[in-house]
Every structure is written in C-alpha cells, then in structure tokens.
Image (tube, grey):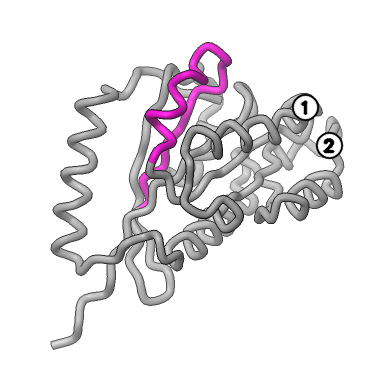
Amino acid sequence: MSQPRKKVLLKIIILGDSGVGKTALLHRYVHTQFIQEHKATIGADFITREIAVDDKLVTLQIWDTAGQERFQSLGTAFYRGADACVLVYDITNDQSFKQIEMWRSNFLEQSSPEETEKFPFLLCGNKSDLQTTRAVPTQDGERLAKQYNMFFYETSALDGNNIETAIRKIASVASDLDTVPSFNEDIANKSLKLDLEENETKTKPAEGCMC
C-alpha cells in the first residue's frame, strides 16, 4: 500500500485597494467565472481550494479582505498565521499601485512573520485585459517586485490570464517553507475542520464581496 501524500494547509491573504479586482480575481480562480457586478467586501471572507503541488496536497485557505480604509484596523486578527500574501493593484489605476508598499508594510507589521525577508509575497497587476487604459507600465511592476523580492504576474479576472499560474507559484514556494507544518491526510483534514470552525465562530463571514 502506497504512503499517503503529505498534506499542507496554507493561509493566504489577498490585499490591495478597493476596486482593484481582488474578489473577481479570487472568484475566477476558484469558480473559473468572471463576476461582472458585486458589492464591496465587508471585513473579510475566505474560501478553500485543494491543489496538488509536487509531492504534496495543498489546501489553500484564501482570505479576501476589504480594501476600504475603515476596515484596515481588522488586519491583525485576519493576517496572523498567514503563510503567504498576494498584493493586487489595477494596471489602469496608478494610485492603487502606489499603495502597494503601504499594504505590504502594514501586513508585515500586523502579521509579524518569523522571517520577514523570506516571507512569500505575490504581486499581481490586475486587469491586464485593459491595455488601452493602462496607467502602470509592466516594467514598474517588475521593478517593485524585484525591490522587495516578490513574485510578479499581470493578471486578468476577466479572461483568467496568469491567475492559475500565479497562485500555484506562491503556493509551491510557501508550502516548502520550514515554518509550514506537513501532516498526513487524516490529520490534515481534522486540522482544517477545526480551523474553519474556529474562524467561522470568530468572524462570521460577511455578506457581499469585494472588487
């Protein structure tokens, strides 16, 4: 009888200004569909998806957070225990790109990871389908990612460009870190169930979603 594959649980936080397409990006990744109209996320909500990465089964717990300033004080509760962070800006909105460093800094301050310099960040320049109204050159995204040792992709929630590749990349890197525990499948399933129940009790996922 073959040995069960190791199973890893990853908590991933998605951050960025309101309107950059965080919820649409996540919806495309999980449901392979584009949501045209949706309300702004209130507080935070999360989804789970299991993928195979190398020799591991990785369960992603992806937290979709509100981009509005009035909800940023909730950060500490939601960021703690995160294994990776996705920073999203809108390539047609220069201001959303300028805010990325603030989002990154706030996340590190509130999550307090063990090794800041090794913590996995993914930078996504979203809405790559809107080339005619582009305000942020690709080179600027590449430059910022290199400055902070982040992975970088331009993505589109509309057509799905690079989303699967980008999430798989950050999941692969994060799942290899020494700080992320591995379990056999039975233990991991029990751990995930307890984690989900605890988060539901504490946060009660809000109605609505965020763009």
| Position of residue 179 in the picture relative to residue 118 (left or right) | left
Image: 167 above or below 43: below
Query: Magenta includes 76?
Result: yes
Q: Amino acid at mark 1?
A: Asn
Residue 7 % position (x, y): 28, 65
The quadrant of the picture occupied by the N terminus is bottom left
SS label for mark 2: loop
Packing grade of label 1 (10 A; few <14, some 14-19, many >=20) is some
Most foreground residue, 92 or 61: 61
Q: Amino acid at mark 2?
A: Val
Residue 98 % position (x, y): 77, 30
For residue 93, the mark is: 1
Identify the residue at image location x=65%, y=46%: 123
The quadrant of the picture occupied by the C terminus is top right
Q: Quadrant of residue 197?
A: top left
The boundaries of the magenta stretch are: 60-80
Q: Quadrant of residue 103?
A: top right
Residue 24 showing in the rendered view: no
Image: 75 above or below 182: above
Packing grade of label 2 (10 A; few <14, some 14-19, many >=20) is many
Q: Quadrant of residue 90?
A: top right
Asked if labels 1 and 2 touch by Cβ distance under 8 angstroms, the answer is: yes
Residue 91 % position (x, y): 76, 35
Identify the residue at image location x=79%, y=52%: 142
The answer for how far apart the CA atoms under marks 2 and 1 are is 7 Å
Q: Which residue is mark 2?
A: 136
